[in-house]
Image: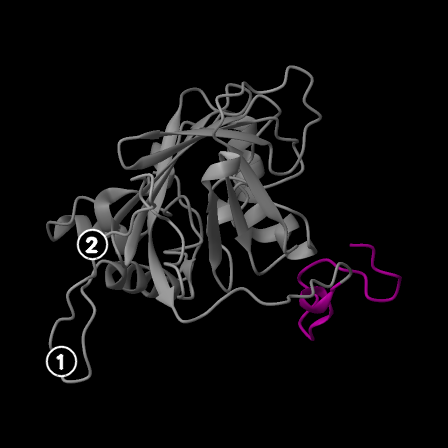
Amino acid sequence: MRIRPVGTLKILSVLILSSALVQPLLAQDGATVPARPIPRLPSGEVSLEAPQGELGVWNRGDYRSIVPETEVQTALRDRGRPDGGNPMNLKPLFSAVPFQPWAETVYLYRQEHEIEPYGRCKPTGGFRNMAVPYGTDIVQVPEEQRIYIFHTGGSHTYRTIYLDGRPHPTDLDPSYGGHSVGHWEGDTLVVDTVGFNERGWIDAYGVPTTTQAHLIERLTRLDFNSMSYEMIVDDPGAYTATWKTGMVMRWTPDVETFQFLCQDGNLAQELMVGDGSSGIDRTSPIVP
């Protein structure tokens, strides 16, 4: 068994929060509040945005795209929880991800020694594009055959998904978020993305990718209050096979995105008082 060191308390917190996402909403008197019907656009497509005249954003289920192998998960499986405590069994255990040896080494190294690019105001793609602080705003523009995804935290950028049937360009300039085209399969939005650079992370914990990365994302609104997000990773440069992960996102009503200033040179974590175990030389200038 490969073990990624992680605090037991932190894992328990993740599992408890994840489990809470699939619970029904409760009124103040403890009664269950039935979910509203899934909203639709005039075209009949499922609406992933706030209804007309209302506010709301989607909030992440969990930053992690991979669940660590720990004694906590083992105990849960022994108690009849074969999914390791994950809602809808969406996240793979670390041992199930088909890393190439170099990619596994990079992933583990990043856990202890690197801070994600997103925390340095760089754009992001895939799972991390949906699992962001302060909410994700999805805007559908049928007349343009496009969907825009805005996220509040981090670099405060947006992502365009083209639904007009166009192919990916053959001369893509690799970027943090890649190039996305999409289509509907029934009530599920399927997004196909290529053209990633190798500097970005597709989750908050350092999942590596190469310029060969090809992501398929599936967004399915389960009811008014929840949405399933699934990401399939196909990157022969970093993995020996395709693998998938996901989360259940929750609808947060009556809020909207706001101005967020990302401090590109923020060195707070390195400058905190500690025992110097980070290896940072505080006697010389720090370059992010």
Residue 93 in the image: above or below residue 258: above
Q: Is residue 68 left or right of residue 26?
A: right
* Residue toward you, 230 or 135: 135
User: Can see residue 84?
Assistant: no
Q: Are marks 2 and 1 in contact (CB under 8 Å)?
A: no
* Residue toward you, 52 or 114: 52
Residue 99 at x, y = what percent? Answer: 46, 28
| Quadrant that contains the C terminus | bottom right
Q: Nearer the viewer, mark 2 or mark 1?
A: 1
State yes or no: residue 271 in magenta. yes
Q: Is residue 176 left or right of residue 7?
A: right
Residue 32 at x, y = what percent? Answer: 12, 71
**Which amino acid type corresponds to the residue marked 2 in the rendered image?**
Ala
| Disc 1 residue crowd, few under 14, some 14–19, many 20+, Cα 10 Å | few
State yes or no: residue 252 in magenta. no
Q: Quadrant of residue 52?
A: bottom left
The colour scheme of the drawn protein is one colour
**Which amino acid type corresponds to the residue marked 1 in the rendered image?**
Gly
Residue 185 at x, y = what percent? Answer: 30, 29
Q: Is residue 108 left or right of residue 68?
A: right
Query: Which residue is most to the bottom?
Result: 29
- Which mark, by number, is residue 75? 2
Q: Quadrant of residue 124?
A: top right
| Quadrant that contains the N terminus | top left
Question: Which range is magenta?
Answer: 266-288
| Label 1: element kind | loop
- Which mark, by number, is residue 30? 1
* Residue toward you, 121 or 5: 121
How far is mark 2 from mark 1, CA to CA? 31 Å
Residue 27 in the image: above or below residue 198: below
| Label 2: element kind | helix
Residue 147 at x, y = what percent? Answer: 49, 41
